Image: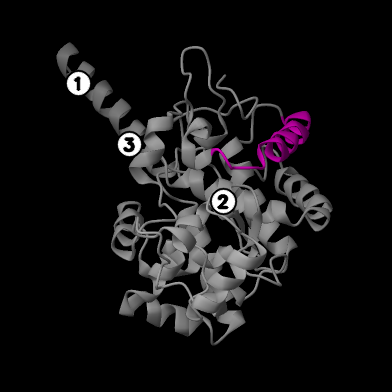
Amino acid sequence: MKMGSQSCFKVLIICLIAIIGAANAQLQLGFYAKSCPKAEKIVLKYVHKHIPNAPSLAAALIRLHFHDCFVRGCDASVLLNATQSNPQAEKNSFPNLTLRGFEFIDKIKSLIEAECPGVVSCADILTLSARDSIHAVGGPFWNVPTGRRDGVRSKAADVFLGLPAPFHNVSTLLTLFGNVGLDANDLVLLSGAHTIGISHCASVSNRLYNFTGKLDQDPDLDSAYAKNLKTFKCKSISDQTTVLEMDPGSRNTFDLGYYKQVVKRRGLFESDAALLKSSTTRSIVAQHLQSTKKFFVEFAKSMEKMGRINVKVGTEGEIRKHCAFVN
């Protein structure tokens, strides 16, 4: 074989190896079975120890995972702090200012680092924590494939490009979900996590006091419920801090309560009310109201699906030593 042919052959072999490596680099169950066999148990133990004492953190962790995955994929970029060279990270973006749970994830990361330094990604820890927190408040448990790697970019401006907002209509919501490979069923199912959610008067004040700029009320919000909110909770449009349960009476239990609120037109967000605006999503809501068991099964599928959005695997990204900083 001539020298030139040998060089071409070597290049071809290297390319084939790279292609095969990329094909094999994907999420898989038990990814850390050999490299850090106790990793998933460490997450599970910590979550189940602390969530029962602070159940509102379950909703916070699910929200953190959601906000991460919809912006550049599930790569833990939402956990990164701003730096001198990057003064506005994702967590500094307006929609993310009320996110919680960062210290919780940092603590789990420190426990795992003590067991297996530099092995388990923050992206996987966040994904596992979201699953375990749902289970800790009575929700389903499902197998989470792991092997995600951590991103190295976190820009506040990116958040506005893909993150669904509480004021979005059903058309916009379906578009944003579709952009990341999710569908109408996923929209309804993942919205179901609001059953353990809390919000603040700021998120509903316009619906109560100034929906179209004419000091009016949103007609899609049940009038009796709106009156109750105005009388006992959000007593003025300027109230930014009063806490509201998204599923009043059972916010600490993962159940069908959220859907029951939605069909009564008592969902807090415009995005909740939007689920009734499409015959497709309205039908899906009705279906899930029929069976808690089916809702749990389908919700788990959608969460697992969301956890695969634009993940970094193989040699992409890195395994952070601390979740708030790139290495």
* Image coords of residue 110 (percent x, y): 75, 31
Determine the residue located farthest toward the bottom in the rendered image: 290
Residue, x 18% and y 12% (percent of image)? Answer: 3
Residues shaded magenta: 97-116
Which residue is the site of mark 1?
Answer: 8
Tag 3 or tag 2, which sits nearer the N-term? 3
The answer to whether residue 267 of the structure is visible from this angle is: yes
Q: Position of residue 74 (x, y in %)?
A: 48, 43
Question: Residue 132 lies in what quarter of the image?
Answer: bottom right
Work out how far the residue at label 1 is from the one at label 3, CA to CA, in angstroms.
Answer: 16 Å
As drawn, the label of residue 219 is none
311 or 176: which is nearer to us? 176
Tag 1 and tag 3, C-beta contact below 8 Å: no
Q: Residues within 10 Å of mark 3 (few under 14, many from 20)?
A: few
The residue that mark 2 highlights is 63
Q: Secondary structure at mark 3?
A: helix
Q: Amino acid at mark 1?
A: Cys
In this rendering, would 5 be left or right of 327? left
Mark 1 or 2: in front is 2
Colour scheme shown: one colour
Could you say which disc has been placed on residue 19 in the image? 3
N-terminal-most mark, 1 or 2:
1
Amino acid found under the numbered disc labelled 2: Arg
Q: Is residue 104 magenta?
A: yes
Q: Is residue 28 visible?
A: no
